[in-house]
Image: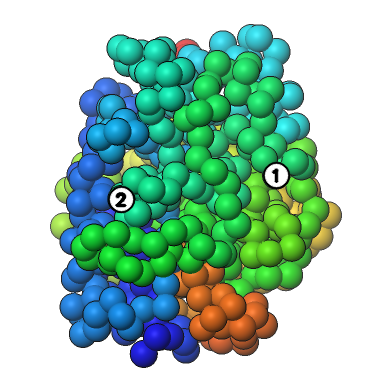
């Protein structure tokens, strides 16, 4: 039974742990949410210590669900919410402050300052990223400038920075390993894509001590052995940021293949192979993975809010009592009744990049019902994806042949059909929706459980395919109204 992989998926709202066998089948599973903190408008925080505690508990539960011990495991794979920034004390292993989540907008003024210093174009050219609070670098600067003694302690080498993968590796290995890999490193705005290394110039411009940073290792390979319960003695063998892990789990190994993950936010990635991507249309260049032979790259469009809007319908408005009610409620009406939601709750991501945008419902009348609001939420997922795909095909110079989809919301047939109608291409949903965790498992088992990416690609199976049913004119009419609503949302907090 040494062909089993334990995959840890540390998401934005909870931890999932799967035990995966050589066929890609899930043999054990466990999940738990953790607390979301919103101390000020536009701020989002996590307790990194809580994330570690829950990860440990969920891993124990997944092993129990699979009815196995650690001796049955060939390795551990980790995938994680990216950009979320943790700073901790190297001697105690304790965070020095709450983790700043990828959605947090608190460093917008730092971005404006860097823009005023003329750094925007150079940062973009070196890292493939836009100058936005989304990424880790300006979050680190915020810590250094706003938390007492942090700069002095960082310069003395007493502190460590990591995204959630590095934080988990540190804890799993008892503080012996401080490491990350290219897909996560490339989301910090401190990693030079062409050089595939931390950029000392950028560190100097931002005043970030290099001693804070983890070592960058290949995405598939040894990250050290776990110590203590629950996974002592098992080797960590694969890591990737959640969206790159999903691209890997979807078998998108050839340039031009693309996937979209509908999670808290949505993320469209297109494999560009060994070519460092350059976007003229508001997309990001990112490292996809390094499985030996050098870094592979991808174009990415990051959408901040999709599934989170369903949570908002449930928790903020009380329109639904369970997230699972959204799809059936939305399907009870033929369309949104010309109502549009722009869920810019923490600004707009790709391809618009406006941290000052805020969410709006447009087109509400006395005839608007909660079903129309639910339908507008699902429509917004598809419209935002079309925004990104339009930019992506322009950058890549190729038309999209198909879109592979995954994530919780992709279970809704209605969403997949609307997406196919808006893109005008077939949307393919895999039998295994949890492709993020599956990708982490594949990376951890590559070379042992799975001999090559060909083995992984051949294991991919479709659960359903959705062909476009709307005319081009119908799709364009709805999309043009969406774009009008997007313009209304922009610059709201700076007006």
Up/down of 422 relative to 435, above or below: above
Image x and y of residue 203, in percent: 60, 23
Up/down of 408 relative to 312, above or below: below
122 horizontally vs 416: left or right: right
Up/down of 64 relative to 120, above or below: below
The residue nearer to you, when weighing 75 against 37, is 75
Q: CA distance from mark 2 to mark 1?
A: 28 Å
Up/down of 448 relative to 440, above or below: below
Tell me the residue at 30%/12% (across/down). Answer: 148
Picture quarter with the N terminus: bottom left
Image x and y of residue 143, in percent: 39, 21
Tell me the residue at 48%/66% (across/down). Answer: 237
The residue nearer to you, when weighing 178 against 307, is 178
Numbered mark located on residue 196 in the image? 1
Tell me the residue at 26%/57% (across/down). Answer: 55
> On the image, which quarter does residue 17 sit in?
bottom left
Secondary structure category for the residue under label 2 = loop
Circle 1 residues within 10 Å: few <14, some 14–19, many ≥20: some
Residue 48, visible in the rendered structure = yes
Secondary structure category for the residue under label 1 = loop
Closer to the N terminus: mark 2 or mark 1?
2
> On the image, which quarter does residue 273 sit in?
bottom right
331 horizontally vs 197: left or right: left
The residue wearing badge 2 is 174
């Amino acid at each position: 039974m040494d062909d089993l992989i334990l995959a840890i998926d540390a998401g934005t709202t909870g931890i999932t742990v799967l035990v995966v066998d050589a066929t890609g089948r899930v043999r054990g599973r466990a999940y738990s949410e953790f607390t979301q903190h919103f101390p000020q408008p536009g701020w989002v925080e996590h307790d990194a210590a809580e994330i570690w505690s829950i990860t440990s508990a969920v891993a124990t539960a997944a092993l129990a669900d699979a009815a196995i011990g650690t001796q049955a495991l060939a390795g551990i794979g980790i995938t994680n919410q990216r950009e979320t920034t943790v700073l901790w004390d190297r001697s105690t292993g304790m965070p020095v402050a709450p983790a700043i989540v990828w959605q947090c907008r608190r460093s917008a003024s730092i971005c404006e300052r860097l823009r005023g210093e003329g750094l925007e174009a150079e940062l973009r050219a070196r890292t493939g990223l836009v100058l936005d609070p989304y990424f880790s670098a300006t979050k680190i600067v915020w810590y250094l400038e706003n938390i007492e003694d942090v700069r002095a302690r960082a310069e003395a080498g007493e502190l460590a920075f990591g995204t959630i993968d590095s934080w988990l590796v540190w804890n799993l290995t008892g503080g012996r390993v401080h490491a990350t890999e290219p897909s996560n490193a490339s989301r910090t705005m401190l990693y030079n894509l062409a050089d595939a290394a931390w950029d000392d110039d950028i560190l100097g411009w931002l005043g970030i001590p290099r001693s804070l940073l983890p070592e960058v290792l290949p995405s598939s390979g040894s990250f050290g052995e776990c110590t203590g319960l629950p996974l002592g003695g098992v080797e960590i063998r694969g890591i990737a940021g959640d969206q790159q892990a999903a691209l890997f789990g979807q078998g998108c190994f050839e340039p031009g293949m693309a996937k979209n993950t509908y999670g808290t936010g949505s993320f469209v990635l297109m494999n560009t192979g060994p070519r460092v991507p350059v976007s003229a249309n508001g997309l990001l260049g990112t490292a996809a993975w390094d499985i030996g032979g050098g870094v592979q790259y991808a174009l990415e469009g990051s959408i901040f809010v999709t599934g989170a809007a369903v949570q908002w319908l449930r928790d903020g408005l009380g329109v639904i009592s369970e997230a699972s009610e959204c799809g059936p409620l939305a399907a009870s009406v033929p369309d949104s009744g010309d109502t549009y939601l722009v869920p810019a709750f923490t600004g707009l991501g790709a391809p618009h990049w406006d941290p000052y945008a805020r969410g709006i419902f447009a087109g509400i009348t006395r005839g608007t019902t909660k079903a129309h609001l639910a339908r507008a939420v699902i429509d917004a997922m598809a419209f935002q994806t079309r925004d990104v795909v339009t930019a992506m095909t322009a950058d890549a110079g190729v038309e999209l042949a198909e879109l592979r989809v995954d994530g919780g919301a992709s279970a809704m047939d209605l969403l997949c059909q609307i997406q196919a109608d808006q893109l005008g291409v077939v949307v393919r949903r895999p039998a295994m929706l949890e492709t993020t965790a599956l990708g982490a498992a594949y990376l951890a088992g590559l070379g042992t459980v799975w001999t090559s990416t060909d083995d992984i690609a051949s294991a991919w199976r479709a659960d359903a395919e959705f062909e476009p049913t709307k005319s081009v004119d119908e799709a364009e009419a709805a999309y043009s109204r969406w774009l009008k609503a997007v313009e209304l949302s922009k610059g709201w907090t700076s007006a």
